[in-house]
Image (cartoon, rainbow, N blue to C red):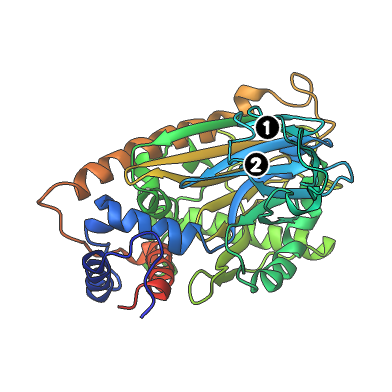
């Protein structure tokens, strides 16, 4: 039996094993998965300590010396662009006596200098200076501890494990063709908002993996969704058949536009059964069909990359465990979810526009961000309600609707990961 690292207590392991064994496919998880600190500790180890997690975009570290810091459980990680323009990631811990090196969430440095005893590191992690050391002190032995990092089309992932899952190479090759035309490495950050949701990270992700709640919960977002979204074809009500015909035409037009330009659009759905599970697809939007705005028209007049039409729908990418993103022709909006505590989760939303786009000329910031600012606030409220509910003694797991199959996939993937470190 493999025991998860942070808590070797046999009672805790037994509790986790029992919870895993009792998991009922097609139903929500038992309350302890969302409320028990022991489960939360296991999540940090089994999920966030061992898999590729999305943490930033290249646009956030556009210049040499630019950095962001990310907190994953107790770990702090520096993601920095070095003097050779390479992206690197390091433990945010001085090799002298362990002081935290960078305390800001982002910034730019020439070198990384410890505030305690001024040990100084190059952005490539090598130790440059350590004062008052003996003559035989070997600086090459005390560089910063590296963290595995990679950029996929401008999206930066890190993995805290000594041996990251190696299936991401294959995932990378498959999604590159989808992301490539948007040229995310040639974008800039138009806006970034951090939102602390008062809910367990799994509730946040489950909420994202379904749109069962969208019709009642997200009036602004659903302006660009076809009213038939989530319906099986055979279950579409008669009153929505005109909307379904509109959807079929929009999908046909989108597929033609993509085929003419050599852009893939087909669904790849592999949200379970592998460590680096993902889903990607390009889908048509309703309304003007151009972007995530109230009327569906493009929010930025400067299209991404070399795209020559705004009508390319939404390219959506979901990556387990903590990412969902949408790439439009005129901008991209990317999300990461990072657990802060058993009942608190940081949701970071970043809007990217073409690097040459000018605010006030090419785009209006309020218009660009309006839909997802409102949607995020609504989701935060819904997730808080869910956290309150699963914390109530009256809670019992309930069945997922057919349209919530991606939620079931997310939970299945999660149980797979937990089972790898806690034998059921």
Q: From this viewpoint, is residue 3 visible?
A: yes
In screen coordinates, is 19 left or right of 379?
left
In screen coordinates, is 132 left or right of 41?
right
The answer to whether 29 is drawn above or below residue 289 in the figure is below
The answer to whether 416 is drawn above or below residue 295 in the figure is below
Q: Quadrant of residue 283?
A: bottom right
Cβ atoms at labels 1 and 2 below 8 Å apart: yes
Q: From this viewpoint, is residue 256 visible?
A: no
Quadrant of the image containing the N terminus: bottom left
x and y percent of residue 255 in the render?
71, 63
x and y percent of residue 246 in the render?
56, 54
Q: Circle 1 — which element?
A: loop
Residue bearing the label numbered 2? 96
Tell me which residue sits at (62%, 69%) in the image. Answer: 163
Task: Choose between 183 and 170: the one closer to the eye.
Answer: 170
Tell me which residue sits at (56%, 38%) in the image. Answer: 349
Tell me which residue sits at (82%, 65%) in the image. Answer: 262
Furthest residue toward left: 394
x and y percent of residue 414 in the render?
41, 66
Furthest residue toward top: 360
Residue 114 is tagged as 1
Furthest residue toward bottom: 1
Q: CA distance from mark 1 to mark 2?
A: 9 Å
Residue 33 is tagged as none
Q: Quadrant of residue 66?
A: top right
Count of labels shown? 2
x and y percent of residue 39 in the render?
31, 58
Task: Choose between 111 and 14: the one closer to the eye.
Answer: 111
Quadrant of the image containing the C terminus: bottom left
């Amino acid at each position: 039996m493999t025991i998860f690292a942070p808590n070797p207590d046999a009672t805790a392991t037994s509790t986790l094993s029992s919870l895993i064994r009792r998991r009922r496919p097609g139903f929500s998880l038992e309350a302890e998965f969302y409320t028990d600190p022991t489960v939360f500790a296991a999540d940090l180890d089994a999920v966030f300590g061992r898999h590729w997690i999305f943490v930033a975009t290249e646009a956030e570290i556009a210049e040499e010396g630019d950095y962001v810091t990310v907190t994953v459980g107790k770990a702090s990680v520096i993601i920095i662009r070095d003097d050779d323009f390479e992206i690197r990631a390091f433990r945010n811990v001085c090799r002298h006596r362990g002081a935290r090196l960078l305390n800001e969430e982002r910034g730019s440095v020439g070198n990384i200098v410890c505030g305690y005893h001024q040990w100084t590191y190059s952005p490539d992690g090598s130790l440059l200076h350590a004062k008052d050391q003996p003559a035989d002190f070997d600086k090459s032995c005390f560089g910063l501890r590296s963290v595995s990092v990679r950029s996929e089309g401008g999206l930066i992932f890190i993995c805290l494990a000594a041996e990251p899952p190696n299936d991401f190479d294959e995932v990378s090759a498959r999604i590159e063709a989808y992301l490539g035309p948007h040229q995310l490495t040639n974008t800039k950050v138009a806006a970034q908002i951090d939102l602390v949701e008062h809910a367990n990270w799994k509730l946040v992700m489950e909420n994202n993996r379904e749109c069962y709640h969208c019709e009642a919960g997200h009036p602004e977002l659903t302006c660009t969704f076809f009213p038939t979204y989530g319906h099986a074809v055979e279950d579409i009500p008669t009153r929505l058949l005109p909307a379904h015909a509109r959807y079929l035409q929009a999908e046909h037009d989108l597929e033609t536009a993509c085929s003419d330009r050599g852009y893939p659009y087909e669904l790849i759905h592999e949200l379970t059964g592998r460590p680096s599970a993902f889903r990607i697809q390009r889908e048509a939007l309703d309304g003007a069909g151009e972007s995530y705005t109230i009327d569906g028209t493009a929010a930025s007049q400067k299209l991404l990359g070399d795209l020559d039409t705004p009508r390319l729908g939404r390219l959506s990418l979901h990556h387990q465990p903590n990412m969902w993103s949408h790439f439009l022709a005129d901008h991209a909006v990317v999300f990461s979810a990072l657990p802060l505590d058993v009942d608190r989760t940081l949701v970071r939303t970043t809007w990217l526009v073409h690097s040459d786009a000018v605010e006030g000329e090419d785009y209006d910031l309020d218009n660009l961000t309006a839909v997802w600012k409102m949607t995020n606030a609504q989701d935060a409220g819904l997730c808080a309600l869910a956290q309150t509910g699963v914390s109530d003694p009256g809670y019992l797991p309930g069945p997922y609707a057919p349209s919530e199959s991606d939620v079931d996939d997310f939970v299945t993937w999660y149980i797979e990961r937990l089972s790898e470190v806690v034998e059921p």
